[in-house]
C-alpha cells in the first residue's frame, strides 16, 4: 500500500534533527519539504537586511542537506498550501509554531480552513523549551519579573523534552511545477558591500550550529558567568542567529549542557536560555511589545527630536569609544556582544534621549540574530519601560564600562583602529588626553576621530530630569 502524501512546512526550524513537525510528517507518509517566503503578510514586520542575508545562506545549507529536495515558493502561505494540497492530494500538513502575533493569527486561520476541508493540520513546539501558556503564575496570569518566571515557573514545569534524531527513513514526494524556485530566486541578498561582507564572519546551517555549540562547550563555558562580560574573550556562545532561524533547537542546547555539568557554568548559561523564554512570554501576552511601552508612564517621556545624533550613533561616530566600537562591530559583522548591547542602548536612550524604538529598528535591520521577542524585550528593558526593566536612573557610564570590561582595549582597538596608538589611560576618554598624547597617537579630535556628541555628566543629569517628568 502506497503511503499518503503529507507536507512539512519549514519556517524558523531550518534543521533536520530535533524537528518535531518533520519527524511527525515522516511518520505519516511521503513528505513534501516546503519553504515559503512570505513578504506581504498583513501586520507582519518585514525581515531586516541582515536577517535576509542569513536566511539566504541558511536555506542554501538546508537544501544541500536535503540533496536539493526543498520546494521553495514565494507568496501567501495559505494560498500556496491549499493549491499544493489540491495538486498533490496531500492529506496532512505539519509545521512548527511561530510566536509573532501575525503568525499566530494566520496559523489559527489556516489550520481551521484545512481541517474544514478534511486535511489534517498539526503544529508543534520546535522553538521553545516551554510554551508561553505553560509558564504562568498560580493564579493563571503571566509573570512580569524574570527571576520568579524562571525559578518558579520554568524550573518547576516539566523538564524540556529530549532532542529527536534526524527522522529515518525519510520518504520524499517530489513536486515539480512551473512555480518552483531556487534560493537565489528569492533575492534575499542586499547588493551593498556591507551585506556581502556579513557572510565572511559566519558559518550557516545546521552543522555549523552544532559545531558552534560544541566549540563553546569546550572553550567558552568555563568561567562563563564572569567571562561573558568581556567582549574580547570567547565566553559568549554566538548561537543566537542559529537559534532564531532554527538551525539548532533550545532543547539540543539544554541537554548538551548537561554533559558538561561538572566542567562549566551551566546554570548561568541556562539562565540565558530562560531570558529568551521570558522574552517570548512577554511577546505572547503583549503582542504590541515591539512598539508600545509596557510601562504606560513612559508614554509621556519627553524624547528628543530625532536628529543627526541618531546617524552618528548608527555609524559608530559618537566620539565615545566603547559605544562606537560596539556600533561598528554591529555594522561590520551583523552582531554585537551582549555587554555592548546594553552600553550602546543606554547611551542612545539616556545620554542622547532618543526613543528606544529607533534603536530597536536599527538593530532589527542590522542584526543577523534579530528576533522580534528578544529585540523588543531587551530594548524595553534598557529603556526602563519594560517588564523587570533596569531602572531608568541606572545609566551606564561608557567610560567606566570600557575601562572595566575592556581594560587593555583589545576589543575597542579592533573596531576603532584610528585609536590604536592611544594609551589605555585615555582610550575610553580621548577628550581628556593632553595635546601631545593625541599628536603622538596621530589623533586630531573632530577630524580623525569625533568629539563626543554630549557631555556624559550633563546628559545623565538631563536624562534624570526628563525621567522626573514621567512621575
Image (cartoon, rainbow, N blue to C red):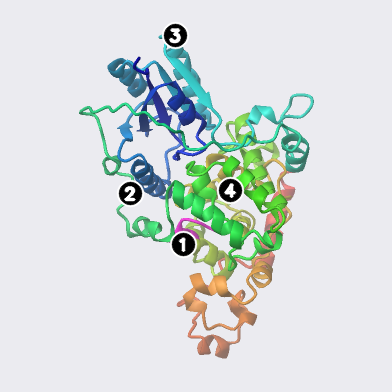
Query: Residue 116 has which mark?
Result: 3
How many angstroms separate mark 4 from mark 3 (CA)? 44 Å
Mark 4 and mark 1 in contact? Answer it, CB < 8 Å: no
Q: Position of residue 117 (x, y in %)?
A: 40, 9
Query: Residue 189 has which mark?
Result: 2
Q: Position of residue 428 (x, y in %)?
A: 61, 74
**Residue 333 lies within the magenta run:** yes
- Looking at the image, residue 88 sits to the left or right of residue 444; the answer is left
The C terminus - image quarter: top right
Q: Earlier in the sequence, mark 3 or mark 2?
A: 3
Give the number of the mark in front: 2 or 4.
2
Residue stretch rendered in magenta on the structure: 330-336
Residue at 41%, 28% (x, y): give it.
8
Residue at 44%, 19% (x, y): give it.
110
Q: Earlier in the sequence, mark 3 or mark 1?
A: 3
**Vertical order, 159 against 213 (above or below):** above
Residue 48 shows in the view: yes
How many angstroms separate mark 2 from mark 4 (CA)? 28 Å
Mark 2 and mark 4 in contact? Answer it, CB < 8 Å: no
Circle 1 SS class: helix
Q: Earlier in the sequence, mark 2 or mark 4?
A: 2
Give the number of the mark in front: 4 or 3.
3
How many angstroms separate mark 1 from mark 2 (CA)? 21 Å
How many angstroms separate mark 3 from mark 2 (CA)? 39 Å
Amino acid at each position: 500500500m502506497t503511503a499518503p502524501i503529507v507536507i512539512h512546512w519549514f519556517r524558523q526550524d531550518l534543521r533536520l534533527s530535533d524537528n518535531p513537525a518533520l519527524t511527525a510528517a515522516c511518520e505519516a507518509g511521503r513528505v513534501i519539504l516546503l519553504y515559503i517566503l512570505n513578504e506581504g503578510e498583513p501586520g507582519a514586520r518585514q525581515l531586516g537586511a541582515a536577517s535576509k542575508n542569513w536566511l539566504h545562506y541558511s536555506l542554501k545549507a538546508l537544501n544541500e542537506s536535503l540533496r536539493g529536495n526543498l520546494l521553495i515558493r514565494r507568496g501567501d502561505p495559505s494560498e500556496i498550501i491549499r493549491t499544493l494540497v489540491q495538486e498533490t492530494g496531500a492529506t496532512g500538513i505539519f509545521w512548527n509554531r511561530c510566536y509573532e502575533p501575525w503568525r499566530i493569527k494566520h496559523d489559527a486561520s489556516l489550520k481551521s480552513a484545512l481541517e474544514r476541508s478534511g486535511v489534517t493540520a498539526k503544529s508543534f513546539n520546535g522553538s521553545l523549551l516551554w510554551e508561553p501558556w505553560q509558564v504562568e503564575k498560580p493564579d493563571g496570569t503571566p509573570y512580569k519579573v524574570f527571576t520568579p518566571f524562571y525559578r518558579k515557573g520554568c524550573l518547576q514545569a516539566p523538564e524540556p523534552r529530549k532532542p529527536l534524531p534526524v527522522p529515518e527513513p525519510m520518504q520524499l514526494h517530489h513536486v515539480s511545477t512551473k512555480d518552483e524556485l531556487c534560493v537565489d530566486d528569492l533575492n534575499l541578498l542586499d547588493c551593498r558591500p556591507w551585506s556581502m561582507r556579513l557572510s565572511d564572519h559566519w558559518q550557516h546551517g545546521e552543522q555549523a550550529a552544532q559545531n558552534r555549540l560544541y566549540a563553546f562547550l569546550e572553550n567558552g563555558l568555563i568561567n562563563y558567568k564572569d567571562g561573558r562580560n568581556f567582549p574580547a574573550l570567547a565566553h559568549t556562545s554566538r548561537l543566537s542567529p542559529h537559534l532564531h532561524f532554527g538551525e539548532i533547537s533550545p532543547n539540543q542546547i539544554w541537554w548538551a549542557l548537561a554533559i558538561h555539568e561538572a566542567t562549566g557554568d551551566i546554570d548561568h548559561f541556562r539562565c540565558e536560555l530562560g531570558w529568551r523564554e521570558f522574552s517570548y512570554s512577554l511577546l505572547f501576552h503583549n503582542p504590541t511589545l515591539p512598539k508600545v511601552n509596557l510601562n504606560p508612564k513612559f508614554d509621556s517621556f519627553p524624547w528628543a527630536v530625532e536628529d543627526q545624533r541618531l546617524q552618528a550613533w548608527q555609524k559608530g561616530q559618537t566620539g565615545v569609544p566603547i559605544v562606537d566600537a560596539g556600533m561598528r562591530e554591529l555594522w561590520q559583522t551583523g552582531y554585537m556582544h551582549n555587554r555592548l548591547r546594553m552600553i550602546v542602548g543606554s547611551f542612545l536612550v539616556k545620554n542622547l534621549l532618543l526613543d528606544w524604538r529607533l534603536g530597536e529598528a536599527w538593530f532589527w535591520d542590522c542584526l543577523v540574530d534579530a528576533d522580534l521577542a528578544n529585540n523588543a524585550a531587551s530594548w524595553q528593558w534598557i529603556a526602563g519601560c519594560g517588564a523587570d526593566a533596569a531602572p531608568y536612573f541606572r545609566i551606564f557610564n561608557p567610560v567606566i564600562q570600557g575601562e572595566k570590561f575592556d581594560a587593555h582595549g583589545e576589543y575597542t582597538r579592533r573596531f576603532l583602529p584610528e585609536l590604536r596608538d592611544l594609551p589605555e589611560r585615555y582610550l575610553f576618554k580621548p577628550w581628556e588626553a593632553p595635546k601631545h598624547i593625541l599628536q603622538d597617537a596621530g589623533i586630531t579630535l573632530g577630524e580623525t576621530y569625533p568629539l563626543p556628541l554630549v557631555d556624559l555628566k550633563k546628559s545623565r543629569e538631563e536624562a534624570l530630569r526628563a525621567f522626573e517628568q514621567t512621575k
